[in-house]
C-alpha cells in the first residue's frame, strides 16, 4: 500500500511540475507577445507610484490583458524597483515586456506636455504643446512672448504638472548676448550668469532642464556641445582652406549662418567667401557691419546706411581685410561643415534673388545684372506692399 501511495505521489508531483512548467511558459508567452492596445496611449507614471498602480492603469486603458503577469515579469527581470516617473508613449500592440522596458529605462518623457523656450534671432517665445499619442504629433496648447503678451492660464497649469518636460531651444544665428538675456528671463531657472560666453561658443540645439536648474550649467552644456561641433568640423576640413585655426573656421561659419537661411545654399555661400579670401578680396558682407553696430545686442531693425558701410569697426568687412576678429553669431552644425567643406565654385558674388535665396555670379557684370534684377523685385514688392526677402 505504501508503495502505491509513493508511486501515486510521484505521479502527482510529475504532473504538477508539468502543469507548473506549462503555466510558466504560458505566462512568459503572454508577457512577450503583442498586447491588445489598438491605439497609442500616453501613460503617466506619477512620482512615488509603484508597479501595481501602473499595471492597474494599463489594464483600465486596455493596454495589457493581465496586470498580475506584468508585475510577475517585472519582478522576475529585476525591474520593479527601476520604475521611473514621467509620461511614456505606449505604442499599439506593445507587449508587457516592452512596456516594462519603457517605464524603467529612464531618460526624458516620450509624450505628454512640453514647455519650450524658443530663443530666436527676432523673437523669444514660449511654446506649450502636447503629444497626441494617436497621431504621434505635437499639438500646440499655447504660444506667447513672455513680457510682451499676457501669460495664458494654461502655462501655469501645465508647468505645475510633475511630468512636464522643459526645454530651451536655440535657433541658428542667435548671439550669445541674446541667449543670456533670454535665459535671465526664464523664471523657472535659478542662478546668476557670471560671464557672457564668447560669441559663437554656444551650439544651437535643444537643451532639457528641470525647474530650479542653474543657468550657468545650461550655458556650460551649450559650450561643450559647440566645442565638439567645431572640433569635428576642423578635423574634417578640406585642405588648403584660407583659415588657420578652429576659431577662424568658427568665425567664417558664423558669417555663412547670417547670410543665408537656405540649407542647400550654405556650401555655395561658403565658396564665395573662401574664393574671396584666396583672391585677397574683402568679404563685403552686411551682417558683419551690423554686428559692428549692435555688438550682437539685439536686432538692428532697419537697413544699413551708406555711412555705416564706410565706418571703420573691427567687424566691417567692407573696410577690413580678411575675417573679423570674432564670430558674429552662434553658427549651427551645417554652417560649420559648409565652412570646413565649401562647394567648389568660381563664384565671388551673390545677391538676394527674391525667393528667399540668392543669385550667384563669377563676374562683376553678371553680378550687376543680378543686382539690377533684385532692385526691380524690391520695387515691385514696395508697389504691392510686399516685404523684402533680404
Image (cartoon, rainbow, N blue to C red):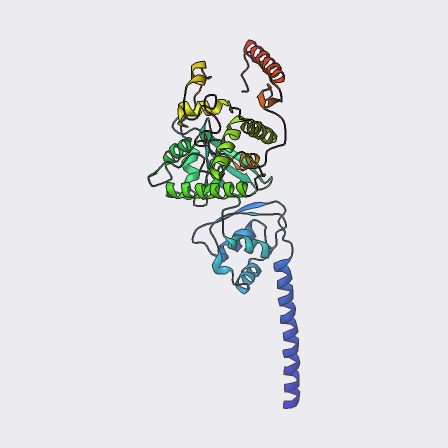
Q: In this view, does 321 lie above or below 88?
A: above
Q: Where is residue 369 in the image (x, y as percent from the top left)?
A: 62, 14
Quarter of the C terminus within the rendering: top right
Locate residue 266: give its quadrant. Answer: top right
The answer to if 140 sits in the magenta stretch is: no
Q: Give the range drawn in magenta.
A: 317-322
Locate residue 301: give its quadrant. Answer: top left
Quarter of the N terminus within the rendering: bottom right
Residue at left 49%, top 28%?
322
Q: Do we see residue 1 in this rendering?
A: no
Q: In this view, does 83 lie above or below 270?
A: below
Secondary structure mainly formed by the magenta segment: loop
Total number of numbered discs in the rendering? 0
Left/right placement of residue 211 relative to residue 106 reads left
Residue at the extreme front of the image, as rendered: 280
The answer to if 321 sits in the magenta stretch is: yes
Residue at left 65%, top 64%?
26
Q: Where is residue 159 in the image (x, y as percent from the top left)?
A: 42, 39
Q: In this view, does 57 lie above or below 286?
A: below
In depth, the one of 342 and 17 nearer the eye is 342
Q: Position of residue 189 (x, y in %)?
A: 37, 40
Q: Do we see residue 30 in this rendering?
A: yes
Q: Where is residue 29 in the image (x, y as percent from the top left)?
A: 64, 61
Amino acid at each position: 500500500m505504501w508503495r502505491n501511495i509513493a508511486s501515486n505521489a510521484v505521479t502527482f508531483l510529475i504532473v504538477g511540475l508539468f502543469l507548473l512548467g506549462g503555466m510558466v511558459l504560458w505566462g512568459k508567452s503572454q508577457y512577450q507577445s503583442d498586447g491588445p492596445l489598438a491605439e497609442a496611449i500616453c501613460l503617466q507614471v506619477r512620482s512615488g507610484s509603484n508597479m501595481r498602480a501602473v499595471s492597474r492603469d494599463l489594464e483600465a486603458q486596455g493596454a495589457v490583458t493581465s496586470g498580475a503577469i506584468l508585475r510577475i515579469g517585472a519582478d522576475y527581470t529585476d525591474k520593479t524597483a527601476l520604475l521611473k516617473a514621467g509620461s511614456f508613449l505606449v505604442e499599439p500592440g506593445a507587449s508587457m515586456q516592452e512596456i516594462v522596458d519603457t517605464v524603467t529605462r529612464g531618460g526624458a518623457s516620450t509624450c505628454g506636455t512640453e514647455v519650450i523656450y524658443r530663443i530666436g534671432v527676432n523673437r523669444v517665445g514660449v511654446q506649450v504643446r502636447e503629444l497626441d499619442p494617436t497621431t504621434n504629433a505635437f499639438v500646440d496648447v499655447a504660444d506667447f512672448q513672455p513680457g510682451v503678451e499676457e501669460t495664458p492660464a494654461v502655462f501655469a497649469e501645465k508647468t505645475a504638472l510633475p511630468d512636464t518636460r522643459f526645454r530651451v531651444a536655440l535657433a541658428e544665428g542667435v548671439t550669445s548676448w541674446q541667449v543670456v538675456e533670454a535665459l535671465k528671463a526664464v523664471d523657472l531657472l535659478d542662478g546668476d550668469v557670471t560671464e557672457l560666453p564668447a560669441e559663437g561658443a554656444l551650439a544651437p540645439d535643444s537643451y532639457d532642464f528641470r525647474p530650479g536648474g542653474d543657468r550657468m550649467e545650461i550655458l556650460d552644456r551649450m559650450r561643450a556641445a559647440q566645442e565638439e561641433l567645431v572640433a569635428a568640423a576642423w578635423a574634417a576640413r578640406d585642405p588648403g582652406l584660407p583659415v588657420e585655426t578652429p576659431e577662424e573656421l568658427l568665425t567664417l561659419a558664423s558669417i555663412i549662418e547670417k547670410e543665408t537661411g537656405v540649407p542647400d545654399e550654405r556650401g555655395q555661400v561658403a565658396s564665395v567667401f573662401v574664393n574671396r579670401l584666396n583672391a585677397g578680396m574683402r568679404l563685403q558682407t552686411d551682417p558683419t557691419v551690423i554686428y559692428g553696430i549692435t555688438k550682437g545686442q539685439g536686432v538692428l531693425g532697419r537697413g544699413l546706411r551708406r555711412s555705416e558701410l564706410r565706418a571703420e569697426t573691427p567687424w566691417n568687412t567692407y573696410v577690413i581685410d580678411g575675417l573679423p576678429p570674432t564670430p558674429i553669431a552662434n553658427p549651427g552644425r551645417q554652417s560649420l561643415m559648409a565652412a570646413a567643406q565649401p562647394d567648389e565654385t568660381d563664384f565671388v558674388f551673390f545677391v538676394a534673388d527674391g525667393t528667399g535665396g540668392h543669385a550667384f555670379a563669377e563676374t562683376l557684370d553678371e553680378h550687376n545684372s543680378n543686382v539690377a534684377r533684385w532692385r526691380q523685385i524690391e520695387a515691385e514688392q514696395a508697389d504691392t506692399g510686399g516685404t523684402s526677402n533680404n
